[in-house]
Image (cartoon, rainbow, N blue to C red):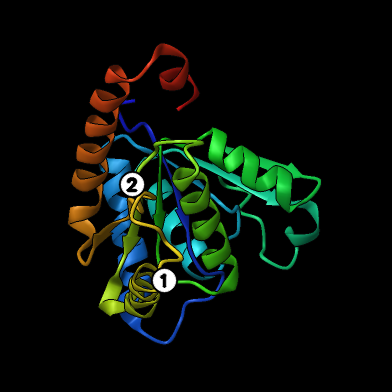
Amino acid sequence: MSTIKTVCVYCGSGPGTNPLFVESAIALGKSLAENNVGLVYGGGSIGLMGAVATSVLQHGGRVTGIIPDFLTKRENALTGAQELIVTHDMHERKRLMFERSDAFVALPGGIGTLEELVEQLTWQQLGRHSKPILLANIDNFWEPLLQLFSHMRSTAFIRPTLALEILKAELVEDILPRLRSAAALASEEAKKLAADVATRL
């Protein structure tokens, strides 16, 4: 996989306290649309989720929202998306988000955002996929988590033999270039692997 056609964005259903968070979500939506990269996200119309998806639509891009039935009212499902998939539960939602995405970006968010991000990191670490994962470290939002990862590594819970391939960008304009570079590198590495392993990745 060397081409990024769709990006899954994990982010908060609230706007947060820092105006930069919403501004960055809007800027990311614009960037995705202008680069003809589809957005896959949690399907809501509020908070950062709503900001990034609405921005994609306003700039002529494509949006796929995936939301469980019980959240359609709570998070005000974005009916304007070209594709809105309503799932039975969170597990189906996350599986479809994974299957439909070439890369993952975590904007600021809460426990749900963290849980989705860490699941992808876990799957990557266990060799289940090689799709790029990037932290949009807006105003250093993710620094405490990065420090925790360093602590986990220094205490040998992230072992030296286990790679933690996580990208980081402080500026929205750096997000797509870094995802594309990582995807191209992963594609080249996959070509060197045994055929069955490369297919699995």
**In front: 121, or 63?**
121
Q: Residue at coordinates 74% horizontally, 61% vertically from top-left?
A: 71
Outermost residue toward the bottom? 17
Would you call the spot at circle 1 few (<14 residues within 10 Å), some (14-19), or many (20 or more)? few
Q: Mark 1 — residue?
A: 152
Q: Residue at coordinates 41% horizontally, 71% vertically from top-left?
A: 152
Q: Position of residue 91 (x, y in %)?
A: 72, 48
Question: Quarter of the image holding residue 96?
Answer: top right
**In front: 136, or 162?**
162
114 left or right, relative to 144: right
What amino acid does circle 1 point to? Answer: Met
Q: Mark 2 — residue?
A: 59
User: Which mark identifies residue 184?
Assistant: none
Q: Residue at coordinates 47% horizontally, 77% vertically from top-left?
A: 15
Q: Position of residue 60 (x, y in %)?
A: 36, 40
Earlier-in-chain disc, 1 versus 2:
2
**In front: 37, or 8?**
8
Assign the C terminus to one quadrant of the image. top left
Q: Position of residue 119 (x, y in %)?
A: 55, 54
**In front: 44, or 183?**
183
Q: What element does badge 1 sit on?
A: helix
Label 1 to label 2, Cα distance in Å?
Answer: 41 Å
Q: Position of residue 194 (x, y in %)?
A: 38, 15
103 left or right, relative to 178: right
Would you call the spot at circle 2 few (<14 residues within 10 Å), some (14-19), or many (20 or more)? some
Q: Nearer the viewer, mark 1 or mark 2?
A: 1
Q: What element does badge 2 sit on?
A: loop
Outermost residue toward the top? 195
80 left or right, relative to 168: right
In the figure, 82 relative to 105: above or below?
A: above
